[in-house]
């Protein structure tokens, strides 16, 4: 390692990324942030579906929108390079097979069987590269009663039970404000790929990873799924209340709402003492978490009376000073104005060659020896086609020109 050069955990790992939209690109962005070389394959002309999912779009130097650079696309595609390859062209499919031979990981989110017609399915790739980790992300998995269905995050949130426990108690089903099934699936996919990569490095044996949005949405029901499996409790919507921890919700204060999250008996006593109501901590109705759950309405009502006429900001400061978890209910604008953002370096800003700034939320984990870094801004469609095919396959200018002329690839 050269002096001053940053160590990257996944340095030398090559990822062939045939995914688009969010779950797949989210997973490959994590790999890229940690140092992997990610080759993003895009359909010539159209590119990743999310490129056009706007507004808002990135602003060009003249102030106009770039219709292929939506904020949605930008959030999941940094640290990658884009090659525009036509999979339906025989030479394009052949290029993918050659790239897979040199890849460590391949990621795709086509419908089940969708790549077989191009000879790009797992069995075909395994014959070329037995050590390849091949990850297939779908709505409902490679097997089972719904395998042939198309799937989006919204459908998975609904089918997976998540929307039945999200929203106000007497309201209708509600999806999360971000695509949590997609995001969770991307993260589970990344963990699975890294585990499979470790196995491949030890044994030379690759494997197929079959991961779906619905499987993941069910897995991330966590304690709510366990409540059903263990206790037969079919939970419903509870608004901002917690199913088993009380008081743990939003409370109205003089200038809005704040969160008070009392997670144990010690925190409950601290709240009561700080608010001048120490007798509540010894009340038989509230002395333990189980009793507070039984008497939920009573203690939540008392808490609401205590805080109703207080300013939220000072109250939060008082509570956190005595180790009672509390916080504001921020808008997205609010949190990005919070001093936490600068202190934790939460935003990274790329500056493109034309002077356009591309802001991005940074990788959240702070690794002491191999931190995430930001080598590549989100690419334009096919802007790296030639350099990637030269690096990965050592194609010369004549071969690249022939592929372009034949319509198999496009260089921006």
Image: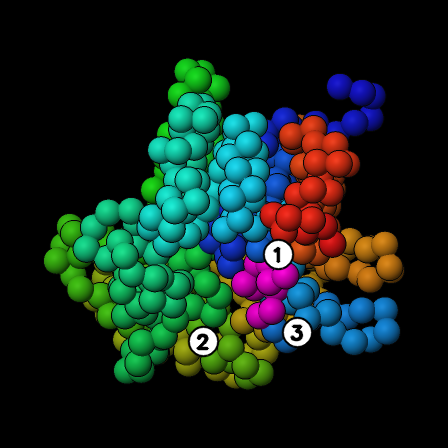
Numbered disc in front, either 2 or 3: 3
Q: Quadrant of the N terminus?
A: top right
**Camera sees residue 186:** no
Dot 1: few (<14), some (14–19), or many (≥20) neighbours within 10 Å? many
Dot 2: few (<14), some (14–19), or many (≥20) neighbours within 10 Å? many
Question: How far apart, in angstroms, are the residues tagged by discs 2 and 3?
Answer: 34 Å
Give the vertical position of 204 relative to 39 (above or below). above
Helix, strand or loop for disc 2: strand
- x 44%, y 72%: residue: 250
The residue that mark 3 highlights is: 56
Which residues, given as a range, are shown in magenta?
45-53
Question: How far apart, in angstroms, are the residues tagged by discs 2 and 1?
Answer: 52 Å
User: Residue 55 magenta-drawn?
Assistant: no
Classify residue 267 as left or right of residue 392.
left
- x 40%, y 74%: residue: 303
The x, y position of residue 379, in whole percent, is 70, 52
Q: Quadrant of the C terminus?
A: bottom right
Q: Which mark is residue 91?
A: none
The residue that mark 2 highlights is: 251
Helix, strand or loop for disc 1: loop
Question: Which of the two discs, 2 and 1, labels the residue nearer the N terminus?
Answer: 1
- x 57%, y 58%: residue: 48
Question: How far apart, in angstroms, are the residues tagged by discs 3 and 1?
Answer: 23 Å
Residues at badges 3 and 1 in contact (C-beta under 8 Å)? Answer: no
Classify residue 410 as left or right of residue 131.
right
Front one among 315 and 9: 9
The x, y position of residue 316, in whole percent, is 57, 67
The residue that mark 1 highlights is: 44
Front one among 392 and 264: 392
């Amino acid at each position: 390692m050269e002096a001053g050069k940053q160590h990257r955990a996944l340095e030398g790992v090559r990822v062939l990324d045939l995914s688009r939209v969010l779950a797949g690109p989210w997973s490959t962005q994590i790999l890229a942030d940690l140092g992997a070389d990610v080759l993003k394959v895009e359909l010539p002309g159209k590119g990743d579906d999310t490129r056009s999912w706007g507004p808002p779009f990135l602003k060009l130097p003249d102030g106009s929108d770039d219709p292929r650079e939506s904020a949605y696309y930008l959030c999941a595609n940094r640290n990658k390079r884009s090659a525009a390859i036509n999979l339906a062209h025989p030479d394009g499919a052949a290029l993918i097979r050659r790239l897979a031979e040199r890849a460590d990981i391949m990621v795709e989110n086509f419908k089940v069987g969708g790549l077989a017609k191009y000879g790009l399915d797992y069995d075909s790739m395994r014959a070329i590269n037995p050590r390849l980790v091949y990850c297939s992300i779908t709505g409902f998995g490679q097997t089972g009663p719904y395998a042939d269905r198309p799937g989006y995050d919204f459908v998975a949130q609904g089918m997976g039970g998540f929307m039945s426990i999200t929203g106000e108690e007497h309201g209708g089903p509600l999806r999360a404000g971000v695509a949590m099934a997609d995001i969770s699936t991307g993260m589970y996919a990344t963990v699975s790929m890294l585990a499979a990569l470790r196995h491949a490095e030890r044994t030379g044996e690759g494997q197929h990873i079959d991961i779906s949005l619905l499987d993941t949405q069910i897995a991330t029901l966590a304690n709510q799924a366990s409540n059903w499996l263990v206790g037969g409790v079919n939970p419903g919507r509870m608004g901002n209340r917690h199913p088993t921890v009380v008081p743990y919700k939003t409370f109205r204060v003089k200038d809005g709402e704040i969160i008070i999250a009392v997670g144990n008996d010690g925190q409950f006593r601290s709240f009561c003492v700080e608010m001048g109501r120490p007798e509540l901590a010894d009340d038989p109705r509230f002395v333990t978490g189980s009793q507070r759950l039984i008497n939920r309405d009573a203690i939540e009502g008392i808490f609401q009376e205590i805080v109703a006429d207080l300013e939220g900001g000072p109250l939060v400061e008082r509570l956190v000073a005595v180790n009672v978890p509390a916080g504001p209910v921020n808008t997205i604008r609010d949190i990005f104005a919070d001093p936490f953002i600068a202190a934790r370096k939460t935003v990274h800003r790329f500056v493109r060659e034309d002077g356009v700034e591309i802001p991005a939320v940074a990788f959240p984990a702070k690794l002491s020896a191999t931190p995430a870094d930001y080598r590549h801004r989100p690419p334009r469609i096919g802007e790296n086609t030639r350099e990637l095919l030269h690096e990965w396959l050592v194609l010369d200018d004549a071969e690249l020109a022939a592929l372009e002329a034949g319509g198999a690839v496009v260089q921006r």
